[in-house]
Image (tube, rainbow, N blue to C red):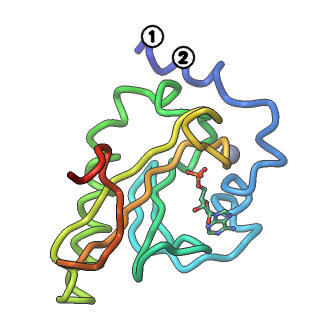
Amino acid sequence: MKDNNKEIKNKDKDEGECIFCKISKGEINVDKIYENENFFSFPDANPVAKGHSLIIPKNHFKTALDLPSSLGQELLDCIKNTTMKLMKEDESIDGFNIVSNNFPSAGQAVHHVHFHIIPRKKDDGKILSLHDKK
Ligand code: AMP
Ligand code: ZN
């Protein structure tokens, strides 16, 4: 598909320096939670909640805008299976946030697109609301 060719060209030339590419290539070891053909998940090194995990594509794409639309189904598969596994392992998790920071102005620190899964519990006191609580 046209979409796929464009994505291959969009691969970042800084890929060799990318920490998530190093993880994807096995140069840095992580405990994988779930994996499919193009994505996998692993624990965030600086968790904001117990079970905080990251989902990344195996290939280097900078932001969600660079991700092939054709990978959407696999991305959702990885999000769902990772989250279900976390919820199974800790039955006190009764909600979760999916967060993706894209571009520096939105807080993206690692420029290999990723999706945070942040497990939530009732009254856990975490504030991830987009709007101020009144
Ligand atoms: P972001 O601000 O959305 O780019 O977040 C990047 C996330 O990657 C942060 O939550 C970091 O804790 C996490 N992170 C960076 N390096 C590693 C690593 N080697 N293993 C696991 N998580 C990492
Ligand atoms: Zn990368």
Pointer 2 residue Cβ closer than 8 Å to ligand 2: no
Q: Residues within 10 Å of mark 2 (few under 14, many from 20)?
A: few
Q: How far, Cα to Cα, is label 1 from label 2?
A: 5 Å
- Residue pictured at 24% horizontal, 60% vertical: 80
Query: Which amino acid, mark 1?
Result: Lys
Quarter location, residue 24: bottom right
Q: Residues within 10 Å of mark 1 (few under 14, many from 20)?
A: few
**The disc label shown at residue 2, or none:** 1
Quarter location, residue 25: bottom right
Query: Which amino acid, mark 2?
Result: Asn
Find residue 35 and report its horizontal and vertical position in percent.
41, 64
Position of 111 compared to 87: left or right? right
Q: Which residue is mark 2?
A: 5
Find residue 44 and report its horizontal and vertical position in percent.
54, 70
Find residue 49 and report its horizontal and vertical position in percent.
42, 77
Q: On the rendered image, what quadrant is the N terminus found in? A: top left
Taking 120 as reference, is 127 above or below it? above
Callout 2 secondary element: helix
Position of 105 compared to 101: left or right? right
- Residue pictured at 81% horizontal, 36% vertical: 14
- Residue pictured at 37% horizontal, 36% vertical: 71
Taking 58 as reference, is 28 above or below it? below
Position of 55 compared to 5: left or right? left
Label pair 1/2, CB-CB below 8 angstroms? yes
Callout 1 secondary element: helix
**The disc label shown at residue 42, or none:** none
